[in-house]
Amino acid sequence: MSSLHELQLGFMTAIFSGAPNGLGLELVENGISGELRLDIYRNNVFGALTQALRLTYPVVHTLVGEVFFNYMAKGYIREHTSTSGDLTHFGSGFPVFLEEFPSALDLPYLPDVAYLEWLCHISYHSADHMPLALERLANLPPESYDNLRFRLHPACHLFASSYPIHRIWQICQPDYAGNETVDISLGGINLLVQRMGLRIMLQPLSKGEFALLGAFSSEQGFAEACAAALEAEPGFDLSGSLQRFVTQAIVVDFLE
């Protein structure tokens, strides 16, 4: 007779590997064999986890179709078992998995689509934050400005791709109506993923905007962030962009 620990490990192995390893003999049979009971449980587990991936990666699902998505999901689930009772956290490694998935190598943009969708997912579930306290900023001495480290809203995330991912994401939305062609040769894009209310918005960014927000997100000082933005885009409108980022609650806090 196996110990409880051995039974639990054997059960998990049987579910995710598909190899019962004699575990069926340990299960109580009551009109249904142990092996069949394992099959039923396995189908339920894989079905629930596949649905979780489908909800997190709807654009990937649209691009590859139901059958191929289920095939990819099955491979991912076998290699990445859920470690949390909250399925919100499941699927974080799916973009990396797609980078190395042999059957998807002819879709080189697919991992970037998945990376973007994961950012949309975590943005939706991120904490909220009050707008920037302008009166606190106004009370600071001017000599301290250069070292201020501005912070982005917790639901704001930056994403860069060498493919026209924004266009791909747009035409795969349920309410999209229009030309569905995508020219991969158009090149990449810099994006800001932002939650507004209960909606996820994707905002294309110029090189200067992306460099400035990227410097903020890595907690660089204000002077250093401004220098990075101007290097990326000479003539960049620093004051206008910063004002817009504050107004749109993209920049919401700072450290002195």
Image (cartoon, helix red, strand yellow):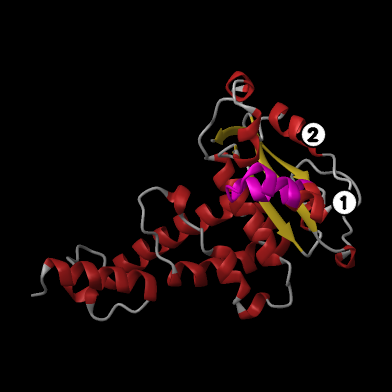
Q: From what the image shows, is residue 227 above or below residue 81?
A: above
Q: Earlier in the sequence, mark 1 or mark 2?
A: 1
Q: Which residues are magenta?
A: 209-227
| Residue type marked 1 | Pro
Residue appearing at x 68%, y 62% in the figure = 112
**Residue 124 picture quarter:** top right
Q: How many marks?
A: 2
Q: Quadrant of the N terminus?
A: bottom left
Q: Position of residue 241 (x, y in %)?
A: 79, 36
Q: Is residue 245 left or right of residue 17?
A: right
Q: Residue furthest top?
A: 135
Asked if residue 169 shows in the view, the reply is no
Residue appearing at x 72%, y 34% in the figure = 245
SS of the residue under disc 2: helix
| Magenta span main SS | helix
Q: Position of residue 25 (x, y in %)?
A: 19, 76
**Residue 61 picture quarter:** bottom right
- Which residue is labeled 1 in the image? 234
